[in-house]
Amino acid sequence: MSKVVITLPDGAKREFAKDLSALDIAKNIAPSLAKATLVAKINGELCDLSTVIDKDCRLEFINRDHADALEVLRHDCAHVLAEAVQSLFPNTQITFGPAIENGLYYDFYRETPFTPDDFPAIEQKMREIIAQNQPFTREIWQREQAAAFFKQQGETFKAEHVMRLPEGDDISIYRQGDWLDLCRGPHMPSTGKLGKAFKLMRVSGAYWLGDQNNPQLQRIYATCWRNEKELNDYLHFLEEAEKRDHRKLGRQMALFHTQEEAAGSIFWHRDGYRVYRVLENYIRNRLHQDYDEVKTPQMVSNSLWKQSGHWDKFGDDMFTVNENEIDNDALQRIFALKPMNCPCHVQIYNQNITSYKDLPVRLAEFGQVHRNEASGALHGLMRVRAFTQDDGHIFCTEEQVIDETKKFCELLKSIYQDCGFSDFSIKFSDRPEIRAGEDEVWDKAESSLKEAIEATDMPYVMNPGEGAFYGPKLEFVLKDTLGREWQCGTWQVDFVLPKRLGATYIDANGEKQVPVMLHRAILGSMERFIGILLEHHAGHLPFWLAPVQIKICTITNDLDDYGCEVLQACIDSGLRAEGDFRSEKVNYKIREHSLKKIPLLIICGKKEAENGQVTLRFLGKKEQETLDLNVALQQLRQKSIIPQFAEILPSGLV
């Protein structure tokens, strides 16, 4: 009998009869293995357990706890969802339903809109289908056969899709009981393997094939997990994320708002702009010894963007203005609001003849940029059309790249810690498919960046194909309180742009050379980073960053004079303090200011006034501490000026 050699994940090799299915092999190894397995992985590709193995291969059995299991579970859940919907609403047409991050969706065509009120009935029908434990079976049809079937069933969208496939292609169909769908697979052995850890989440609109000229579909989103604990953990995560939504906090704390008349731009209110300016000045103070701060124009001719290569890459996403001048001939120039600052910084560098002795030259700018993001992608502070980058560019020699990388990574790590982020990772993004520059230049840039990051002893992972179009980059990814990841900082090595824009320096031999251009940002976008900060801290911003650090509350109005004295002392100490001398009960004031996330309340009562003291009450803490006013001011001043100062106050202050 002919044999095949199977290599198992631990490296062990075993022989089995040829043409056994993956399920047969699992049963042969151990019945318990077959029972626990959902799908197989053959030579790295997920496959049905019914797949026949006719040649030597690497074989892995994927159980419920495996990293690949969730995608398969969600894929099966989408099929069960579609069957349930069609069972309850027979005139509904199906289209497609992929697994996505944290769940899945399925697009349907139906005249009557779905609403969340339909969800309980659909979920109940899904549970019935799962309880029936219907087997998933794969069939191969001819293209014309599949198109005719779906057309006869009234599934015009499926029929249309099938006819767009190449003529002669086999069509993969999966059945579960009497219901079937067009699908590549793989699937678990039966619907019963799905379990109960799923929930329908919301419904939205979508266009067939993503084209707004096509019929509108209804997209039902669901989440699906390995078990009910994972499902409940995820639902709790969503609840917590909702509480921390920066848009909600922005309204509650009166920080900012958006409106359609300026879609994609932010209306900063007083307190929001305070946070913005404190953060900006903090970064400015961290840079002032090493960087020259500059300011470049908002609107630049497209001739510069063409020279840099940005016009071909980003031209469709730029906001442009046409300038007409009539002299003997009609002339027209196109200007664009800058989508990035890089070419403008090269223009400043180019104004002087630079010696190698002057390198590195470090330029920094809080540069406002504009990008024409799709309206549907706009999201509070996180995705806007007008935003400010804490941008910087370093012009240096190749030999200086390692030292500059080390210095930048240490600075970035310190700033993130000051902002309350202790956990971040680094991705090394190498050459994208569409890029500027020759392969030899990219080889040099990638080699230089890899040598530099390895010299820092900081761990990194590869992120293939995600580099900038002019050079490889490091992406610094923050992890917030909820475990979500946010890509903020960047560090890019560029041998292309300075050459395109004529940047040079004079080397030790008196000859012109092209400098390396290092692009860097720490926060990324000021707006987005503030949004991340709000959600990470649930609005309880670090004391040094809070828009109003202190509210002075008097217990009775006959203590207002002392309250004013304390308020002035706080202001004179450089603290952002305000007084609340209203004729309200102090507990009412405490509740109100706690909702606005004021980190510290100073309570002034009769005893405090008589002894020159203040009582400190920290946000989120019931304990209070009474100190002499001067002692309290000294501690608060240190805490406000130096974010990384050793903890001398209760943790509730942070």
Image (cartoon, rainbow, N blue to C red):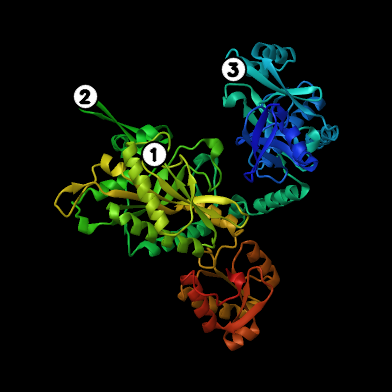
What SS does tag 3 mark? Answer: loop
> To which quarter of the image does residue 629 belong?
bottom right
Residue identifier under label 1: 469
Q: Residue at the spot x=74%, y=44% of the render?
A: 226
Determine contact: label 1, label 3, CB under 8 Å: no
Q: Where is residue 378 in the image (x, y as percent from the top left)?
A: 54, 41
Category of crowding for the residue at label 1, using alpha-carbon neighbours closer than 10 angstroms: few (below 14), some (14–19), many (at least 20): many
Q: In this view, does 293 lie to the left or right of 537?
A: left
In the image, 280: left or right of 478?
A: left
Residue 329 is labelled as: 2
Hey, what amino acid is under mark 1?
Phe
- Residue at x 21% of width, y 59% of height: 357
For marks 1 and 2, the one nearer the N-term is 2
Location of residue 133 by image quarter: top right
Residue 370 in sight here: yes
Real-space Cα separation, disc 2 to disc 3, in angstroms: 53 Å
Label 2: state its secondary structure: loop
**Label 3, on which residue?**
165
Residue type at the position of mark 2:
Asp
What is the number of callouts on the image? 3
Say which quadrant the C terminus sits in.
Answer: bottom right
Q: What is the x, y in percent for residue 514?
A: 24, 46
Residue in view at x 56 percent, y 51 percent? 485
Q: Which residue is drawn at 52% across and 63% down?
A: 547
Q: Which residue lies furthest to the left in this view?
A: 510
Which amino acid, mark 3?
Leu
